[in-house]
């Protein structure tokens, strides 16, 4: 394998993106530098992987099932297989900890997320997902009407969201402070349209917008929405005001890492119209969150997998052999190439990684041509008391109108104690200012000081003393954080084609095959692959 | 003698000075008026009297100006600096004087009078300085035009810009600096014409430095003056990581303030603590193990120690400074009868929520004496999540009691606590009594449903409670009821904090 290819491969693996950039920010301006580093796997491992070529493994340890990728899809598959009697199994992940996009970290003051940090109150038809949440003690029981009761400690505490707009922190993220009647009317019109889609069923009797996306109606009139961008759809509805544009763009960047003018209208509407969850003690738009974000759910998924998750293991090849599937991987700690031979292999990695591992150039070309992955920067700041602008007090989610970032969430928000000596703020920046390839390259070249400055200068608008009050900033770069649901992604045929298993042994599970990167999709991607295996046994 | 152009520009310099003096003068008057209505209330009266005194003093100043016969320019500059000094420090002075002086008004009016007089001298002086340089009709027209434009500017920028952005102390210092700046500029500009310019300049620079320093440290000055804003003599004050503790004392009583909120007055705290403790203690039979959450002053513990059945009191209070004070300071431990030193009492300094989450013990009676739910943090201690945890710390027949703010001032808040306890699976018994230093105060007892008997006797040493008083405390008149369906307080809605802010905010506005 060529060195260049290898770099692309390693940077490509969702969990491996930060690996090559583990070096500390050395050249930070001496006067203003706030301590911190670009985190990920250890720098040594990164350099080792970058610089070495690999031999084929000498021997292959037999396994029933090998899962590559310990993100939500991979762990969900593993959990389901375990519960259905498959225990001769191993889950490989390059990173030092499982989790993929739901990875998390922590310090003396709290745990904090490095990626996905909440799930909405689930739709009630997702039986398997609900039972997982019950198993994780997120659901404590069901009320008389059969509605789930959520653990109060996990429902997002009040005050939940605020938006800094027109010089003031308003409650909630839907802009209203300082808007005139016409601007407010656009929001009413927008939500009326959304409400229509929320309750709509297609000619095939299926819900217009459902989770997982593959359970949605394939009615032609709805599929048409996947042939235009969200911006085009809004233009057609005369929703062209600055505020409504910003709001929808914020939402699609938040959930899909895709701006308004690139995201499919179907996906954009799905964000708003697919959430219908009912609960005994929460509303459909409430969210469940934890100090370490979805790291909590990762812990729950892997709870019974003891010893079966192998981290620091970089898969290098997957080949169909006469006896089953042969998998080669590098054990980063021992620097040995090892082999596994399994009856089944679930490739719970993004498609461009899967194509490389399979050595399938045709697949690789298809993926590169049609799948676009947004790079993200996530920062965790440890802060002392911050100066606050007027309006709603510090909340869980704090968004700045007009900022390229998505604002920050407070990891200590769910803590119940009176006194918080420090808070950990997780700041999210999808790098959508340029085409993904260019933004990714630039992101990897930038050093810690550059990112720190970007974060601080953004937050300075709302917290003028942020530079003095921040004790540490750590940075995580996600090279390929999530696939972009551009037009054609959801209702085109490509996802279905790439989701097909290869022979009887190789199955795929990843949110890029769902088109939208949300927890439920990952969970059901895993379940679907696991069920395919169980059907054969 | 300067040429015409020089004379002309000198004239304009002086006119700009008038403009600034007029602006500053009115600002000082507005600062005084605002401060007086903050501190004394009744803004119509305060503003009316202060405007009157100010205008009258300007008249006195105008009269006095006739006694200045020589060196008019020097006097003009001196007075300018003096206005800067008096006016600049006026807000600080008034903040400090308010709690200390027997009567605040004389100081207030004296200050307004002095400023007015000084400004009153300035205008006639200036007219006289310029009278040889400008034709009379034009002179009068110009001076008064600038004077009144300055007044308009002041009255507009004061409420719109300065009060919201700088606050009163910094506003008055800012204009003081402006005055002094003008004085110093005039010194420089007329250096040749003014005698003793060095002395005047030195004085001006000193005032300038003092005001810049005060401007920079205005926040510290403000917080210091606030600690003086108690009615009585402050005998002790300290800031802990958790709160500001202030203890005041006069001939009648000793008072404890936490973050400026009165916690008790030694004159009537027995009414509060007897009402808080004894109904729940009586109702829980022969309690052996009692839990106190909050209550670091040891006063609830003092009441509980009156019961022979009690073997062990676990007190959990956040602030170690608080419990140490009430254990070791004689003046304070006399009030709690050394309860915190009693071997039956275990003091733990911990966060009540976290402590309760980790606690495995069960108690026969729980007394909850938290601060009022005035913010999102403390509001969490009044949620269903907290009360469900509380249940796990109670034996089957245990009774808990929660101090629940004033049902008179904040009926929705009080009944919201009641709804929250009920939603957490408790049977509740709300009651209230009158504590003179607090007003009407509310408490709610909570126990396992259908297992509750009010105590008929209170067989302990007491000053207030009795079976008859208990009967009375259960009666709620119409003005202490909520009159609308209330939300249950949960971590994800913080309904109580919203009720509390509205109700107490409205009450304190009056």
Image: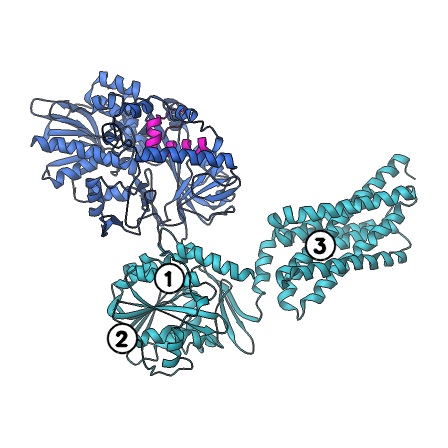
Marks 2 and 1 close (CB-CB < 8 Å): no
Residue A253 shown in magenta: yes
Magenta-drawn segment: A244-270
CA gap, disc 2 and disc 1: 27 Å
Colour blue belongs to chain: A
Check the picture and name the quadrant holding the C terminus of chain A.
top left
N-term-proximal mark, 2 vs 1 = 2
Residue B28: image tag: 3
Work out whether residue A354 or residue B210 is closer to the camera in this orientation and state it. A354
Q: Name the residue that disc number 1 marks.
A: B417
Rendered shade, chain B? cyan
> Same subunit under labels 1 and 3?
yes
Instruction: List x then y, in percent, for residue B348.
Output: 34, 66
> Residue under mark 1: which chain is it in?
B
The percent position of residue B468, horizontal first and vertical second, equals: 38, 81
Instruction: Give the mark nearer the N terminus: 1 vs 3.
Output: 3
């Amino acid at each position: 394998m060529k060195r260049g290819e290898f770099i692309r491969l390693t940077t490509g693996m969702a969990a491996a993106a930060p690996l090559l950039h583990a070096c500390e920010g050395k050249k930070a301006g001496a006067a203003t530098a706030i301590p911190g580093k670009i985190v990920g796997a250890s720098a040594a491992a990164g350099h080792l992987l970058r610089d070495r070529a690999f031999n084929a493994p000498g021997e292959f340890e037999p396994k029933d099932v090998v899962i590559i990728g310990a993100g939500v899809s991979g762990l969900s598959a593993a959990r389901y297989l375990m519960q259905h009697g498959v225990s001769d199994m191993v889950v490989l992940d390059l990173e030092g900890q499982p989790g993929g996009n739901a990875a998390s970290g922590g310090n003396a003051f709290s745990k904090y997320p490095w990626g996905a940090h909440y799930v909405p109150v689930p739709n009630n038809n997702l039986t398997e997902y609900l039972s997982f949440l019950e198993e994780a003690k997120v659901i404590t029981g069901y009320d008389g009407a059969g509605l789930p009761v959520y653990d109060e400690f996990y429902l997002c505490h009040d005050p939940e969201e605020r938006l800094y707009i027109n010089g003031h922190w308003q409650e909630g993220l839907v802009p209203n402070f300082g808007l005139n009647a016409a601007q407010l009317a656009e929001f009413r019109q927008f939500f009326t349209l959304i409400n229509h889609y929320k309750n709509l069923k297609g000619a095939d009797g299926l819900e217009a917008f459902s989770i997982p996306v593959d359970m949605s109606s394939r009615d032609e009139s709805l599929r048409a929405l996947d042939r235009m961008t969200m911006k085009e759809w809004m233009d057609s509805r005369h929703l062209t005001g600055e505020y409504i544009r910003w709001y929808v763009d914020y939402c699609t960047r938040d959930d899909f890492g895709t701006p308004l003018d690139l995201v499919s209208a179907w996906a954009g509407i799905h964000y708003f119209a697919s959430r219908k969850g009912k609960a005994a003690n929460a509303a459909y738009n409430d969210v469940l969150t934890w100090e370490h974000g979805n790291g909590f759910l990762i812990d729950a998924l892997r709870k019974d997998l003891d010893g079966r998750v192998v981290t620091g293991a970089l898969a290098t090849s997957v080949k169909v052999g006469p006896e089953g599937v042969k998998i080669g991987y590098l054990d980063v700690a021992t620097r040995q190439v090892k082999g596994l031979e399994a009856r089944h292999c679930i490739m719970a990695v993004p498609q461009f990684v899967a194509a490389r591992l399979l050595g399938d150039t045709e697949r690789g070309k298809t993926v590169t041509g049609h799948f676009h992955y947004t790079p993200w920067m996530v920062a965790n700041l440890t802060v002392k008391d911050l100066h606050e602008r007027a309006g709603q007090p510090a909340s869980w989610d704090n968004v700045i109108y007009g900022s390229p970032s998505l604002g920050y969430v407070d990891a200590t928000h769910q803590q119940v104690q009176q006194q918080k000596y420090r808070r950990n703020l997780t700041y999210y920046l999808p790098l959508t200012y340029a085409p993904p390839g260019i933004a990714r390259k630039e992101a990897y070249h930038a050093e810690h000081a550059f990112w720190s400055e970007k974060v601080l200068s953004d937050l300075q608008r709302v917290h003028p003393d942020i530079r003095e009050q921040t004790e540490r900033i750590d940075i995580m770069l996600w090279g390929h954080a999530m696939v972009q649901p551009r037009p054609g992604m959801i209702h085109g045929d490509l996802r279905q084609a790439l989701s097909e298993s290869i022979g009887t042994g190789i199955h795929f599970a990843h949110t890029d095959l769902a088109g939208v990167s949300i927890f439920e999709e990952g969970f059901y991607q895993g379940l679907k692959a696991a069920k395919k295996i169980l059907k054969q046994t | 003698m300067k040429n015409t152009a020089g004379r002309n520009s000198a004239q304009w310099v002086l006119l700009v000075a008038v403009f600034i003096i007029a602006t500053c003068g009115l600002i000082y008057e507005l600062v005084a008026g605002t401060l007086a209505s903050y501190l004394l209330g009744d803004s119509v009266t305060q503003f009316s009297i202060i405007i009157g005194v100010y205008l009258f003093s300007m008249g006195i100043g105008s009269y006095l100006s006739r006694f200045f016969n020589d060196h008019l320019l020097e006097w003009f500059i001196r007075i300018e600096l003096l206005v800067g000094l008096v006016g600049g420090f006026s807000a600080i002075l008034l903040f400090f004087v308010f709690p200390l002086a027997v009567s605040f008004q004389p100081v207030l009016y004296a200050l307004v009078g002095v400023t007015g007089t000084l400004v009153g001298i300035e205008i006639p002086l200036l007219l006289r300085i310029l009278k040889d340089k400008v034709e009379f009709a034009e002179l009068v027209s110009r001076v008064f035009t600038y004077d009144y434009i300055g007044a308009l500017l002041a009255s507009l920028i004061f409420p719109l810009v300065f009060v919201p952005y700088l606050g009163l102390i910094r506003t008055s210092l800012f204009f003081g600096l402006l005055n002094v700046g003008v004085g110093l500029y005039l010194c420089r500009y007329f250096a040749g014409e003014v005698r003793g310019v060095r002395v005047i300049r030195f004085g001006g620079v000193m005032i300038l430095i003092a005001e810049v320093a005060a401007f920079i440290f205005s926040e510290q000055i403000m917080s210091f003056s606030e600690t003086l804003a108690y009615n009585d003599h402050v005998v002790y004050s300290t800031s802990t990581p958790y709160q500001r503790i202030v203890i005041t004392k006069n001939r009648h009583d000793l008072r404890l303030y936490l973050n400026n909120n009165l916690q008790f007055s030694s004159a009537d705290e027995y009414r509060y603590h007897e009402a808080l403790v004894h109904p729940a203690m009586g109702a829980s039979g022969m309690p052996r193990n009692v839990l106190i959450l909050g209550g670091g002053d040891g006063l609830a513990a003092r009441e509980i120690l009156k019961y022979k059945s009690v073997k062990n009191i676990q007190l959990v209070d956040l602030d170690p400074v608080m419990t140490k004070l009430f254990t070791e300071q004689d003046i304070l431990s006399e009030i709690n009868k050394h309860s915190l030193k009693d071997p039956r009492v275990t003091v733990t300094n911990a966060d009540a929520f976290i402590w309760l989450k980790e606690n495995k013990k069960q108690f026969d009676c729980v007394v909850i004496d938290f601060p009022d739910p005035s913010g999102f943090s403390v509001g969490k201690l009044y949620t269903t999540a907290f009360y469900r945890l509380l249940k796990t710390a109670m034996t089957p027949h245990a009774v808990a009691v929660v101090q629940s703010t004033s049902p008179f001032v904040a009926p929705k808040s009080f009944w919201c606590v009641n709804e929250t306890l009920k939603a957490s699976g408790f049977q509740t018994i709300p009651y209230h009594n009158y504590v003179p230093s607090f007003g009407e105060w509310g408490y709610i007892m909570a126990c396992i449903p259908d297992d509750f008997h009010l105590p008929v006797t209170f067989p302990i040493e007491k000053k207030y409670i009795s079976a008859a008083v208990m009967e009375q405390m259960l009666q709620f008149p119409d003005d202490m009821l909520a009159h609308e369906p209330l939300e249950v307080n949960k971590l994800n809605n913080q309904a109580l904090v919203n009720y509390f802010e509205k109700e107490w905010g409205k009450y304190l506005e009056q």
